[in-house]
Image (cartoon, helix red, strand yellow):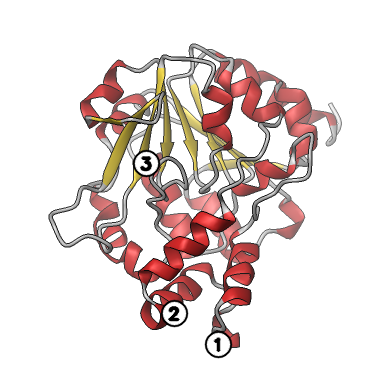
Amino acid sequence: MDAVAEPKALLATLSGQVAAGRLIPVLGPAVLDVGDEPCPVPTAARALSHMLSAKVTVPGRIRNNLWHTGQYIESFRHRVTLDKLMAEFFKPVPSPGPLHRWLASLTELPLIVDTWYDGTMAAALSGRGDWGLVQGASKARRLDEAPWYRAYDSAGHDAPIAAADTWKTVLYKPHGAAQPAGDVLVSDSDYVEVLTEIDIQTPLPDVLKRIREGRGFLFLGCRFYDQILRSFARAFLKRSAGPHYAVLPVDELTKNEVKFLASENITPISLSLAEAAAILT
């Protein structure tokens, strides 16, 4: 088998693993670029940071870092400003692409992890009534004893976190979501407590910990160039059975990404997302 055919054959096999619920997909923002229409929301952390800094002037040295930019806006223009901008940018819900539609059709898939703020995956699942959303919640924006995460049923109504154990498919958005409540983690202060405790798994919902047992992960459209991104990915993988895979541009990886993939035993699959979508679906 030649070098081109090998990753395609591997991904074809992994498609069956995802469909059977034995491999958990993790979606990154780049998945939004594999759609039928131009995407109306930003599809990368750096692009979102630039959009925020176009609305509120921030120092040039931090404009490429989303979380530093978010923190600057929160500190000097108030959290309300940051939340309003995020709500504005992610108010449009992109049309679900082929990967979203395929995943939504898999009734044996117990968990989908979506690491971006958009409502696309939820829109793809909206034709079903047997799913629900569990999302990370910002403790920094609350004065009370805030939870690490919140749950919503398929209609977008608040639900007890225990309800997640009854859903056929759980959509988990660790960084929060623009819909239904606009609760997002996007500034340094949002992540302070999360990163302090993520190694002991406290910020992760029990439903994720239960489902990952005996399963591996397939990262699609995710990158690992930042410590926050690596910390969350590492937390997902902890105590899971594996194996793990990631579809990404191998030739563009940073040294930190290469080291991370090796340390976490994640097999890189060097295909474009468009190619991967065609094979998986």
Determine crowd level at label 3: few under 14, some 14-19, many 20+ residues with C-alpha closer than 10 A: many
Q: Earlier in the sequence, mark 3 or mark 2?
A: 2
Check disc 1 and give the amino acid type.
Answer: Pro
Q: Nearer the viewer, residue 33 or 4?
A: 33
Q: Which of marks 2 and 1 is nearer the N terminus?
A: 1
Residue 168's spot in the image, x, y percent? Answer: 40, 15
- In this view of the protein, can residue 9 be seen by the observer? no
Q: Is residue 215 left or right of residue 160?
A: right
Which residue matches tag 1? 59
Spatial CA distance of label 3 from label 2 is 24 Å
Residue for point 56% across, 64% down: 256
Q: Is mark 1 on a helix, strand or loop?
A: loop
Residue 108, numbered circle = none
Residue for point 48% across, 52% down: 263
Which residue matches tag 2? 72
Dividing the picture into quadrants, the one containing residue 119 is top right
Residue for point 33% across, 30% down: 157
Determine crowd level at label 1: few under 14, some 14-19, many 20+ residues with C-alpha closer than 10 A: few
Check disc 2 and give the amino acid type.
Answer: Tyr
Dividing the picture into quadrants, the one containing residue 149 is top left
Q: Is residue 96 left or right of residue 242?
A: right
Check disc 3 and give the amino acid type.
Answer: Gln
Q: Nearer the viewer, residue 100 or 129?
A: 129
Determine whether label 2 and label 1 are within 8 Å by CB. yes
Which residue matches tag 3? 135
Residue for point 45% across, 76% down: 73
Q: What element carries label 2?
A: helix
Q: What element carries label 3?
A: strand
Q: Earlier in the sequence, mark 1 or mark 3?
A: 1
Determine whether label 3 and label 2 are within 8 Å by CB. no
In which quadrant will I find the N terminus?
top right
Spatial CA distance of label 2 from label 1 is 9 Å
